[in-house]
Amino acid sequence: MSKSSIVAYLALGLVLCQAALWAQEAPKAFVGARIIPIEGPEIENGILLIENGKITAVGSSAAMTLPADTEQIDVSGRVIMPGLIDSHSHIGELEGGDRSAPIQPDIRVWETVNARDSRIQKAQAGGITVANVMPGSGHLLSGQTVYLKLRDGNTVEDLIIPWEDGSPRGGMKMANGTNSRRNPPFPGTRAKSAALVREEYLKAQEYRAKIEAAEDDEEKMPARDLRMEGLLEVLEGKRIVHHHTHRHDDILTVLRLAEEFGFKVVLQHVSDAWAVAEEIAASDQVVGNSIIMIESPGGKIEAKDITLENAAILEEAGALVGFHTDDGITDSRLFLRSAGWAVRAGMSREKALYGLTMANAIMLDLQDRVGTLEPGKDADFIILDGDPLSVYSKVRQTWVDGVKVFDRDDPQDRLYAVGGYGASNDQANEVHQLSQEADY
Amino acid sequence: MRYRNFILLSLLLAAALLPLQAQVAVKAETLHTAAGDAISDGVVLIEEGKISAVGPASQVQIPSGVTVLEAKVATPGLVDAHSVVGLAGYLNQNHDQDHLEESSPIQPELRALDAYNARETLVEWVRRHGVTTLHTGHGPGQLVSGQTMIVKTYGETVDDALMVPSAMLAATLGDGAKASGGRSPGSRSKMMALLRSEFIKAQDYLDKMENAEEGKEPARDLHKETLAKVLSGEMPLLVTAHRSRDILAAIRLAEEFGFNLVLDGAAEAHLITEKIMAADVPVILHAPGMRHFGEAENATFEAGPRLRDAGITFCYQTGYEGYVPKTRVLLFEAGWAASNGLLWDEALAAVTIDAARILGVDDRVGSLEVGKDGDVVLYDGDPFEYTTHVTGVIIDGQVVSQEKH
């Protein structure tokens, strides 16, 4: 047996050992909390039952019979709700398009994520369990975004949500308005911005036509083109477009382009949503609105009319509304207040909480896995010491895939939660799996 | 005839204005005065712009004809201890950004009142969220960026709004004050050398002014004159510094020249509380929910309670924001402090009476006490909760907002 195959067998053994531990893990029941499942009514004295990283049952304490080997965790007095989903974030020190060209669909940001960025721990402390991590808005199209599960990971591979073929799930970041306007080859006007985008999608349609015409004949297939491949995934609906847009006419331009090329789009920021809420709600191309809750207007011309009332106005129009942090524009640890402020400005409590969870799951096409507390979904949830819409409430614990990734009673986690010396250092994550259990 | 018309018009105008100056009473289920315990079913009576009575409804007689506003909760008008609102506008374009002159690193002669836009959208914005007194002016970003002033958040001109025309002289230490491209100051030590040299010159100017014979004083020098006001104790130096070494440098400078120092921002103050306490320097702390980046990377949401435990005099500010959001809302910041280790009353004090004391205007604002300005904010619930609204704002006895925000 060669040295390398011994190493391989040892590695395989370790993996099998892990799998065995996982499989034998006893079910956990969180007993006595007020449960906000998002789907269905709140449960006053409830039980959340999880096993092997999945939710197996949610219900009233009185009505549930637990499996014999269940580990019971008393959480009476606490509130449990699904892990928060952030549909627009910049945690992880990622890098996207490099300003060499306005449209860069070949850019994959997931490869640039620093899994040890302390802002990932801070987001966990804020109760966030899934984040759409995106390149910035200085391009018409700045690259492929990545949906991260905020596990305690050592590398980005530990955080991604893979498709069947192992590639990470994500969307495509686009922008219009002023952010992506600069000197050539970038557009100088809004009309030029739209023209450049249309040109590129037309090319992608041609590329698709060539592939279809080849009918799986390798000889006839067009040469691989990474840029076209990226756009093809948008046209196929595999990647939802996350479109930075503020001004009302820019929003309508997005609707027009999405209609023309048939792509699905999440409107990001949408400062002027209040002005075109009916048009947004009527569009079949819009998956939803990912809005930012900002306490004052301006800071940039396009956001001069932004209002906390956007959420309520979109709700009234029948549009799907979720919130985002745009971290570092707002701090992930203050994400809950987005919903609080939305209620302040007229939104319903139900839709505000939905906007932190399930609405965003839908906008990331992850609604079958996360966003609510329902049997079969991932065991992503947070434990609060009060109502999620109260300023006084704290996230006590954050769980991802049935693993506790944040505990406010842990001193290191507390440092991430409140800040202090060293809280922003690039930290080695607390990897609860291999590194701690391997016997060297 | 024309004269008579003028008189008539004036009388009519006076009559029209009269209700504004008339008496106003606020009845609140819970009245927080920032001067003692909360009062259940409390009343504040305001006459001629000043508070004439405060107490439980059973003890305060509201005269007939008085406009009465009711609220679940009322507090004193909020005092934002440091901001750039009014000099920095919400559009964030060159034409509405006047908080920072970058032509030279030390410009103490710049007065805030010459740049304040009383009609700026952000002034109305902070007012509708309860701020009635605003310490604003030249911002952080230059070694000595200029003067600050204190205004009320109403009025159509700076003169209407003005409380204190020259409040403090704003300075910055640390990376935020560094010049680029080989210009000075390019380092922290250069900053200190420049400041020391300036104060030595100003001391010399002050000595010459004081000792000169009548008519033989040196020519007026606006630059040195302002620095001399700092040296003579007329105006404190407001030093924005986040890193602990910069805070310590500011304390060292103040001790060398014997001026009054007010620390500003001070993200790392919690690491050196004993030094600050020993120097007996007040701190206008950064916004409690400030983002923890750059020089503020070691900031904590719990800075307030840590300074409190050390016995340091402090209050909060909304500070300077360079992008989105263009300004923070003091009420929301106080709420974040109340949820991160400060007692409720302490959090309120940190945005009312404690701020007024550090600014030196506690004889007029910061608490609901007889004789003080009639500045009151009304709410429909716990002011700090996300879901509560401000339902009214009164400044100098004038109801300036009755909208729900």
Image (spheres, helix red, strand yellow):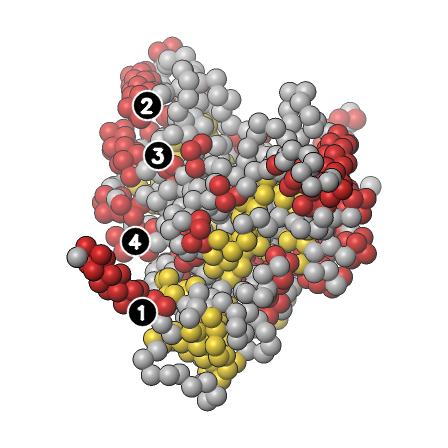
Residue that protrudes farthest toward the front in the picture = B214
Establish whether labels 1 and 3 are both on one chain: no
The spot of residue A408 in percent (x, y) is: 65, 59
Q: Residue at x 50, y 45 (%)?
A: B113
Name the N-terminal-most of marks 4 and 3: 3
Amino acid on which disc 1 is placed: Pro
The answer to which quarter of the image holds residue B346 is bottom right
The residue wearing badge 2 is A189
Comparing marks 4 and 1, which lies closer to the viewer?
1
Comparing marks 4 and 2, which lies closer to the viewer?
2
Establish whether labels 4 and 2 are both on one chain: yes
The residue wearing badge 4 is A313
The residue wearing badge 1 is B19
- Asked if labels 3 and 4 touch by Cβ distance under 8 angstroms, the answer is no
Q: Chain of mark 1?
A: B
The answer to which quarter of the image holds residue A173 is top left
- The alpha-carbon separation of the residues under discs 2 and 3 comes to 28 Å
Establish whether labels 2 and 3 are both on one chain: yes
Establish whether labels 4 and 3 are both on one chain: yes
Q: Residue at x 34, y 62 (%)?
A: B403
The spot of residue A335 in percent (x, y) is: 50, 52
Q: Chain of mark 3?
A: A
Amino acid on which disc 2 is placed: Thr
On residue A237, which mark appears? Answer: 3
The spot of residue B176 in percent (x, y) is: 64, 35
Comparing marks 4 and 3, which lies closer to the viewer?
4
Local crowd size for mark 3, using a 10 Å CA cut-off: few (<14), some (14–19), many (≥20): some
Q: Secondary structure at mark 1?
A: helix
